[in-house]
């Protein structure tokens, strides 16, 4: 019996317009009635997730910044910040890669260089709030804890950014590719999957009682700790191989449809209660 569900956001739970399914509030209420825990696991930062979910956020567990920050209702957030020297080293390397823009993701704010072109800024706005454009040199002086460094390359991170980042930092840090234009750098051992495993231990839930949904490489670690692991139909083929099942695409409301099918919930009843 399912006791824990963890879902990615972009390309998974959210539709093509970055909106929640209309049935989500009613589904959340039904899961709460059945004593099933729902965790939102995203590369997005805390402020963006809280803004998107509004009042519903009070009932959810958030695995933010790919696991670098975990928030549970009524508990203090747990976060893992990068060492200052690592931040300087990444900034130094990015300064030699003109198409790779570093985005420093703090607990409260987001920072990126003011010389980023409009296309990059528009891409950052799709996923982040509370951001500050600053001179590149000011990135070195950021005072608040930095939980992860997101790297944006509009030509594609897998081909143009990942090789150099992985060569320099791959053995010391977690460096998942999280989208066509994005990859992230976090402390070693900090992943969505590690956060889900911590929840399993805390709640006394086994992988056989866990369902996960994802669409990109930063979701693979979640798929590996759940018997009910789903990759979205829109996920790349190499990601789908890590999941035990395939869910309909995010544009087809695949997460809600799959949860309803597995748990025996009628979609029509959710629509009536929205």
Image (cartoon, grey):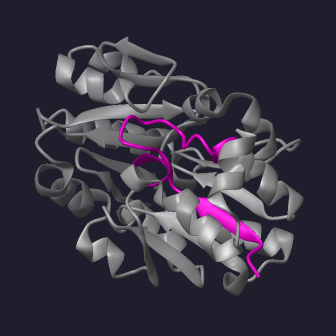
Can I make out residue 6 in this image?
A: yes
User: Where 234 sits versus 156, above or below?
Assistant: below
Can I make out residue 61 in this image?
A: no
User: Where 193 sits versus 131, above or below?
Assistant: below
Residue 25 at x, y percent in the picture: 70, 42
Q: What stretch of residues is rendered in magenta?
A: 1-25
In the image, taking residue 19 as reference, residue 136 lies left or right, namely left
In the image, taking residue 211 as reference, residue 43 lies left or right, namely left
Residue at (19% x, 39% y) in the render: 153
Residue at (35% x, 13% y) in the render: 134
Residue 13 included in the magenta stretch of the image = yes
User: Where 88 sits versus 258, above or below?
Assistant: above
What quarter of the picture does the N terminus occupy? bottom right
In the image, taking residue 122 as reference, residue 219 lies left or right, namely right
Residue at (24% x, 54% y) in the render: 165
Quick one: 245 or 196, which is closer to the camera? 245
Residue at (48% x, 38% y) in the render: 84
How many marks the image carries: the answer is 0
Residue 54 at x, y percent in the picture: 69, 28
Residue 196 at x, y percent in the picture: 65, 67
């Amino acid at each position: 019996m399912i006791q824990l569900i963890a879902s990615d956001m972009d390309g998974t739970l959210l539709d093509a317009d970055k909106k929640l399914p209309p049935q989500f509030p009613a589904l959340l209420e039904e899961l709460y009635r059945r004593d099933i825990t729902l965790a939102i696991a995203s590369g997005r930062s805390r402020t963006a997730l809280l803004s998107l979910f509004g009042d519903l956020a009070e009932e959810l567990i958030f695995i933010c910044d790919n696991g670098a920050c975990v928030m549970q209702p009524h508990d203090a957030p747990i976060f893992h910040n990068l060492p200052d020297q690592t931040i300087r080293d990444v900034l130094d390397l990015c300064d030699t890669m003109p198409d790779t823009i570093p985005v420093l993701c703090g607990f409260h704010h987001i920072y990126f260089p003011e010389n980023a072109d409009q296309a990059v800024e528009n891409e950052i706005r799709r996923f982040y709030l509370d951001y500050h454009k600053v001179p590149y040199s000011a990135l070195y002086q950021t005072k608040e804890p930095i939980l992860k460094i997101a790297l944006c390359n509009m030509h594609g991170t897998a081909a143009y950014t990942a090789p150099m980042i992985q060569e320099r930092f791959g053995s010391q840090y977690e460096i998942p590719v999280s989208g066509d234009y994005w990859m992230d750098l976090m402390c070693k051992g900090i992943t969505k999957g590690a956060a889900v495993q911590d929840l399993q231990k805390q709640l006394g839930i086994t992988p056989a009682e866990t369902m996960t949904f994802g669409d990109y490489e930063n979701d693979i670690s979640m798929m590996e700790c759940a018997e009910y692991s789903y990759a979205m139909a829109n996920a790349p083929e190499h990601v789908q191989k890590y999941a035990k099942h395939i869910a309909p695409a995010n544009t087809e409301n695949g997460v809600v449809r799959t949860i309803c099918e597995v748990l025996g919930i009628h979609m029509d009843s959710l629509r009536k209660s929205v």
